[in-house]
C-alpha cells in the first residue's frame, strides 16, 4: 500500500487463532495493513472472512482464553500495542482508539441515560466531573447532528431511533478524540436512508476532526463511497489490497472480480436477467483446501493453485493480490499463461 | 397485459397497542388502505424502509394475519370471506419464503420430514410418492438427494434458504410471497439463490410478491414495483420506469440513498433525506411524507394526496417530480 506522510496504525502479520472442542482455526491469518492519518481504510468480506475478528484483535477484545492473538507488530501512533498488557490496552481503548459496532441497541445499556454512557470515556480517561462531561456530550451531540441535543441528553436508549442511537455511538467513539475509529458494519442494521445520513456524517467528521477510520463492511457500495484504501478478505487472509480507484477499476483477484460482478446494481439492469455468482461457498476454516483457499470456487484455477498458497504479490502501483495469476512461485515453474484447468 | 392473479382492495391492518386502566389503547396503522393488482407470472417487488408495513402487508395478503378491513382477492375469490377450512384448501397455492433461513426450519426435523410435512397435509399421495417428490424438490433447488437424511444445522445459510424454497414449492404453488428471502445471505450466495428463484419462476409459472429493502435486487429481478411508506403505497409502476424516473419524492430519495459500487461516482448530486420516519401511531397530517419531503408545501401538510395515474403509474403526491 502506498506510504503516507503519517501512519496512524500499522498492523503487521496479525494472527488470531481459536482452540475449541472441534479443533483449531485461524480466523485471522497473517494480516498486514497500514492506516494513514485522516484516511478511511476499508475491510470488506463475507461472513467468516475474518474482517470483524481483525478489528477485535486490534482492539484487544478477542475473548480469552479461547482466542489467541499474535502479531509481529501493531503500532498505533508510536505505541506498540502488542507489548501493552491488559491494563495498558484498557488505557488506550476508548482514548486513542474506539470502536462502533453494528447494533447500537445491544451496545448501549438500556437502563442508563444516554449522556452518562456517551460521556463514560471522559470519566475513565480524563477524570472529568459530571458537569464537564454533560457539557462535552452536548457538544458531541451537536457535532454528530442529533436534533434537540439538549433534550436528548437525559433520554434512555429506547427513546432514540436506530439512526440517533448510532449517532450517539459515534459521538461516544469520538468523544476522547481518538486517533483511530474502527466502525464494524456501522450501518448494516439501519435503513438505506438512515445509512446515507450516517455515512455522510462519518465523512464530514473525518474532514473536520481528522480521525482515521477503519470501515468494516460486506457492502462494496459503502467501500466505494467512503474508503481511500481497501482490503478484501477471504478465509482469514487479505486477498487483495489497494487504492479504492485501482481496486474497482482493476480488480485483480478472481474473488474480488466475482464479488463486484455479483452485486445487483441499481444503476442499470442486466439484459440477460441473470446475476453472475461465485459458485460454491465460503470454506470451513477447519478444513481449508490445500494451496490457494479460493481454488474450489475459482474460474481461473491452475495446477499450481492446488499445490501452493500464493503470496500477496504486487500487481502494480502498490496494488497487491494473493493470486498465482500475478505471482511466480519462487522455487518452482511459473504458471504458463492461459494454462487454465 | 396478462391477467390479474392477486388483488387487494383498500386493505387495512390496524393494531391496538398499549392501553391500560386509564389510558386508551393507541392504534398503529401498519397497513392503511392498500389497493394493488398483481399479474400472472410477474415479479412484483414491494420496497420500503423498516416499519413501513411491507411484511405485515405480505402476511395479511396470505391471511397469516387477519385483515382489519378491505378485500384480498385471489383468482376471483375473496379470501377474507372464506372460512378456515376453505382457506386451508387454498394454502398449497399460496406460499411464503421467509427471511431467516436459521429460524424458519425446525432444527429437530430431518430435511425429508420438513419437505414431506406440507405434502402430507395436503394429501399428496403414498409414502413412496412423497419420498420421491422430496427427492425431486432437492434436485429442483440444486441440492443433492442424499441430504434428505440431514438436519438443518448441517447446512450453510444459502443451502437452508434453498430448503425453504423447496418447502414452499412442494405443493406446486401459484403465488409466492418472498419476504426478504435473500437478505440474510452473503452477496456471492445471494446471486445464486436469486438465479434459482428466477429459473423456478420460468419453469413453474410462478408469480412472486417480493418484499425487500434491497433496491439492487429489485432493479435486476422485478417487473413492477410498489413503494410503501407508513402503511400506504405511494408509487406503483414498471420497475424500469421507476428506477429511471421516479415520480414520488420518497421514491427518488430512497433510490439516491443506495451506495453505488463505483468510486468514480462519488461526486454525483445526491440529495439525502432528513430526519426519521414518523411514528405510525402518531401520523403527520396531510401527506404522511411531508415532514421529510424537500418539496413539501402548505397543501401537503393539510390535505392527503389521492392516488392518480401518470404514464402508466399510480402516484400519491400533490407535486409529482418531472411529470
Image (cartoon, grey):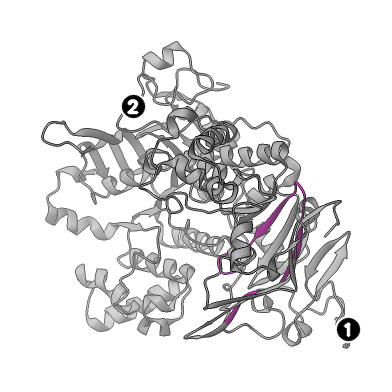
Instruction: Report which residue position mark 1 lands on.
Output: A330
Do marks 1 and 2 both belong to one polypeptide chain? no
Q: CA distance from mark 1 to mark 2?
A: 68 Å
Instruction: Report which residue position mark 2 lands on.
Output: B283
| Secondary structure at numbered mark 1 | loop
Residue B52 visible in image: yes
- The answer for which chain carries disc 1 is A
Quarter of the picture holding the N terminus of chain B:
top left
From this view, report whether residue B247 is shown above or below residue A96: above
The quadrant where residue A1 appears: bottom right
- The answer for which chain carries disc 2 is B
- Name the residue rendered at 58%, 31% in the picture: B245
Q: Is residue A211 magenta?
A: no
Q: Nearer the viewer, residue A4 or B86?
A: A4
The magenta region covers: A25-49
Q: Position of residue A14 (x, y in %)?
A: 70, 72
Q: Position of residue A217 (x, y in %)?
A: 60, 56
Other residues around mark 1 within 10 Å, as few (<14) / some (14–19) / many (≥20): few
The quadrant where residue A318 appears: bottom right
Amino acid at each position: 500500500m502506498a506510504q503516507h506522510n503519517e501512519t496512524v496504525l500499522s498492523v503487521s502479520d496479525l494472527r488470531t487463532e481459536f482452540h475449541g472442542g472441534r479443533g483449531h482455526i485461524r480466523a485471522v491469518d497473517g494480516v498486514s495493513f497500514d492506516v494513514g492519518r485522516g484516511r478511511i481504510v476499508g475491510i470488506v468480506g463475507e461472513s467468516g472472512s475474518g474482517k470483524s475478528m481483525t478489528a477485535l484483535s486490534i482492539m484487544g477484545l478477542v475473548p480469552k482464553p479461547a482466542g489467541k492473538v499474535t502479531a509481529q507488530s501493531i503500532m498505533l501512533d508510536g505505541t506498540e500495542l502488542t507489548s501493552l498488557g491488559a491494563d495498558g490496552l484498557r488505557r488506550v481503548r476508548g482514548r486513542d482508539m474506539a470502536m462502533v459496532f453494528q447494533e447500537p441497541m445491544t451496545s448501549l445499556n438500556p437502563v442508563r441515560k444516554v449522556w452518562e454512557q456517551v460521556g463514560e470515556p471522559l470519566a475513565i480517561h480524563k477524570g472529568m466531573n459530571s458537569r464537564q462531561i454533560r457539557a462535552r456530550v452536548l457538544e458531541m451531540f451537536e457535532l454528530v447532528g442529533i436534533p434537540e441535543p439538549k433534550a436528548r441528553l437525559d433520554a434512555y436508549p429506547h427513546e432514540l431511533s436506530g439512526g440517533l442511537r448510532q449517532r450517539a455511538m459515534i459521538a461516544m467513539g469520538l468523544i476522547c478524540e481518538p486517533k483511530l475509529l474502527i466502525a464494524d458494519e456501522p450501518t448494516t442494521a439501519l435503513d438505506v436512508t438512515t445509512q446515507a445520513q450516517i455515512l455522510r456524517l462519518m465523512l464530514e467528521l473525518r474532514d473536520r476532526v481528522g480521525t482515521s477510520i477503519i470501515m468494516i463492511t460486506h457492502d462494496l457500495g459503502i467501500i466505494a463511497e467512503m474508503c481511500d484504501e481497501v482490503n478484501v478478505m477471504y478465509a482469514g487472509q487479505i486477498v487483495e489490497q489497494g487504492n479504492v480507484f485501482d481496486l474497482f477499476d482493476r480488480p485483480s483477484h478472481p474473488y474480488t472480480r466475482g464479488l463486484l460482478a455479483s452485486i445487483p446494481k441499481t444503476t442499470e439492469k442486466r439484459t440477460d436477467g441473470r446475476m453472475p455468482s461465485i459458485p460454491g461457498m465460503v470454506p470451513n476454516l477447519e478444513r481449508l483446501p490445500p494451496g490457494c483457499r479460493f481454488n474450489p470456487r475459482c474460474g481461473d484455477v491452475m495446477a499450481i493453485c492446488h499445490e501452493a498458497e500464493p503470496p500477496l504479490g504486487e500487481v502494480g502501483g502498490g496494488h497487491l493480490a494473493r493470486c498465482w495469476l500475478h505471482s511466480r512461485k519462487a522455487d518452482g515453474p511459473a504458471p504458463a499463461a492461459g494454462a487454465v484447468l | 397485459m396478462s391477467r390479474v392473479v392477486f388483488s387487494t382492495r383498500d386493505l387495512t391492518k390496524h393494531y391496538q397497542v398499549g392501553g391500560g386502566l386509564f389510558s386508551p389503547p393507541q392504534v398503529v396503522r401498519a397497513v392503511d388502505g392498500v389497493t394493488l393488482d398483481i399479474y400472472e407470472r410477474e415479479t412484483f417487488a414491494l420496497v420500503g424502509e423498516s416499519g413501513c408495513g411491507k411484511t405485515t402487508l405480505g402476511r395479511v395478503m396470505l391471511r397469516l394475519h387477519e385483515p382489519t378491513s378491505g378485500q384480498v382477492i385471489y383468482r376471483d375469490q375473496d379470501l377474507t370471506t372464506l372460512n378456515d377450512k376453505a382457506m386451508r384448501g387454498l394454502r398449497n397455492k399460496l406460499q411464503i419464503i421467509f427471511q431467516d433461513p436459521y429460524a424458519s426450519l425446525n432444527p429437530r426435523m430431518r430435511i425429508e420430514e420438513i419437505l414431506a410435512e406440507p405434502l402430507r397435509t395436503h394429501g399428496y399421495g403414498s409414502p413412496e410418492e412423497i419420498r420421491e417428490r422430496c427427492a425431486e424438490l432437492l434436485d429442483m433447488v440444486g441440492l443433492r438427494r442424499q441430504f434428505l437424511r440431514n438436519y438443518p444445522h448441517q447446512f450453510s445459510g444459502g443451502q437452508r434458504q434453498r430448503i425453504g424454497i423447496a418447502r414452499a414449492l412442494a405443493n406446486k404453488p401459484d403465488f409466492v410471497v418472498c419476504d426478504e428471502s435473500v437478505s440474510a445471505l452473503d452477496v456471492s450466495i445471494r446471486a445464486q439463490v436469486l438465479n434459482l428463484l428466477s429459473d423456478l419462476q420460468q419453469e413453474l409459472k410462478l408469480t412472486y410478491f417480493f418484499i425487500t429493502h434491497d433496491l439492487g435486487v429489485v432493479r435486476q429481478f422485478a417487473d413492477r414495483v410498489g413503494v410503501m411508506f407508513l402503511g400506504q403505497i405511494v408509487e406503483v409502476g414498471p420497475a424500469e420506469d421507476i428506477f429511471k424516473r421516479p415520480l414520488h419524492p420518497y421514491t427518488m430519495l430512497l433510490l439516491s440513498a443506495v451506495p453505488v459500487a463505483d468510486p468514480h461516482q462519488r461526486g454525483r448530486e445526491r440529495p439525502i433525506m432528513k430526519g426519521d420516519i414518523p411514528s405510525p401511531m402518531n401520523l403527520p397530517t396531510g401527506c404522511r411524507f411531508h415532514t421529510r419531503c424537500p418539496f413539501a408545501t402548505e397543501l401537503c401538510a393539510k390535505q392527503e394526496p389521492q392516488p392518480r395515474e401518470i404514464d402508466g403509474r399510480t402516484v400519491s403526491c400533490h407535486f409529482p417530480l418531472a411529470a
